Amino acid sequence: MLSEPRSGRLAAWGNALLAGLVSPDDAVVAVVGEDAVHRVEGLPGESGPVGLTLALGRLRALGVTGLRVALPAPGHPLGLSGPPEFNKRALEAEEAVVCHGGALGLVPEVYSVGPAGDVHVEVVWHCLEVREAPPADVPSLGEAERELAEALREATALLSRLDVAASGPVTEAAIDAYRARAEQGREVLAPGYPPRAVRVLELAQRVGLLVSVAHENGEGGAVSASEMASRTAALRPVERTARRAQVAAYNAFVEERERG
């Protein structure tokens, strides 16, 4: 969870573009990131895949005024509103973008292309119809911030009991590397987002990192199958809280505009 979901980059920079805060070229560069290319397939009015610049312009013409993120997991349709076909595709991808002001959604499909030693990533966003309804289980920024503060305390205490060094040098090194990338020009969110959304997203990423370290670290006290199962069960609500907060942060742009 320390790295951005592609849906987060598309929603954040797409929102900044729709609001006129960044140029189309800057938005597309930020969304594509280290991938080779992104295309959008199934867009109304287009007979085949199109580039992101054209796709975002077409969405604006179709009445889209903002983009929200969904990060669903089995048993938790976080950020989704249906119909079942879209929810199924989003769950398989573990992420999606839902358009506000137009009954459309975008689900990424990622391909690795090229020979060994020269592999690059291409992304196709599949555009599908969605149900215009409130997204599932997305908290407000204030709720997310309060929940995260408690989750961070719980995760740290839990991992200490499980003898997992999730707050030690490995975690701190990963966080330092993340901050170094940010200082080199990576923005946590696109222009136009409130400072609180940035704060919530950074805290959600830190909690997510703790959970990731706990899952990947097999050297601690939880060495038996039953203990590993207990660890996973204990971490599940913490991970769920972090995902909810991530979605709240990405969706804050649209939520603030709706409030006026």
Image (cartoon, rainbow, N blue to C red):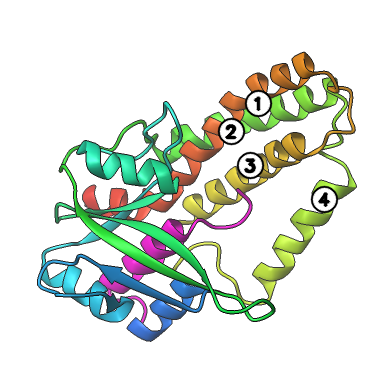
Q: Which label belongs to residue 126?
A: none
Q: Earlier in the sequence, mark 3 or mark 1?
A: 3
Circle 3 sits on which residue?
208
Q: Residue at x 34, y 75 (%)?
A: 21
Q: Are marks 4 and 3 in contact (CB under 8 Å)?
A: no
Label 3: element kind: helix
Circle 4 sits on which residue?
172
Circle 2 sits on which residue?
239
Q: Are marks 2 and 1 in contact (CB under 8 Å)?
A: yes
Q: Are marks 1 and 4 in contact (CB under 8 Å)?
A: no
Q: Which label belongs to residue 235?
A: 1
Is 188 rendered above or below residue 140?
A: below
Where residue 33 sits: x, y (%)?
52, 74
Three-letter code for the amino acid on which mark 2 is drawn:
Glu
Residues in magenta, as a range: 1-23
Three-letter code for the amino acid on which mark 3 is drawn:
Gly
Q: Earlier in the sequence, mark 1 or mark 4?
A: 4
Task: From the viewer's perspective, tell me whether residue 147 is left or right of residue 174.
Answer: left
Give the CA distance from mark 2 to mark 1: 6 Å
